[in-house]
Amino acid sequence: MRPTLSAKPLLNRSEQMLYARLVRAFPGHVILAQVALSQLLIVEGVQSRFRQLVADFVVCKPDFSAVAVVELDDPGERTAASIEKNRRKDRFLHAASVKVIRVAPHDLPSEQGLKALVAVPPPSAAPLMRRAS
């Protein structure tokens, strides 16, 4: 018996809603969905399990450099295996200085909320030097 094949949407309803908000929140940025961490990070000497990790969404500058990874986490679907997988993913991303934001599908942040979560604090201003009189 031959299997029955049919196409399905790439993103579920919650993912579609978050994607739309990210696009509206970050005009001029590139929003990518379902990105393999092996495309996002250069990692040497790591087991093949790294290749199985996927970022839900990546907010990129126009040059495609990552600003942040946004993960859609459903607390009701958390198992020990998924928790460990998320920890590994976070460790890799943090080690590469990529910000990770985790949101719940039942409590998606607004566009303003997403901007605030992704925002990187401005660098500290250098103290002003006074000229000697």
Image (cartoon, rainbow, N blue to C red):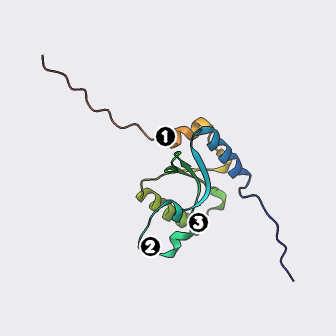
Q: Which residue is drawn at 36% across and 38% down?
A: 123
Q: Name the residue under label 3.
A: 82
Q: Which residue lies furthest to the top in this view?
A: 133
Q: Which amino acid does label 1 sit on?
A: Ala
Q: Are marks 2 and 1 in contact (CB under 8 Å)?
A: no
The quarter of the image holding the C terminus is top left
Nearer the N terminus, badge 1 or badge 3?
Answer: 3
Nearer the N terminus, badge 2 or badge 1?
Answer: 2
Quarter-of-image position of residue 25: top right
Task: Kindly state the secondary structure of the residue where label 3 is placed.
Answer: helix
> Which numbered marker is on residue 46?
2
Task: Kindly state the secondary structure of the residue where label 2 is placed.
Answer: loop
Q: How far is the residue under mark 1 from the one under mark 3?
A: 27 Å
Q: In this view, does 127 lie to the left or right of 16?
A: left
Q: How far is the residue under mark 2 from the one under mark 1?
A: 30 Å
Q: Which residue lies furthest to the bottom in this view?
A: 1
Q: Residue at x 32, y 32 (%)?
A: 125
Against 124, is 37 above or below? below
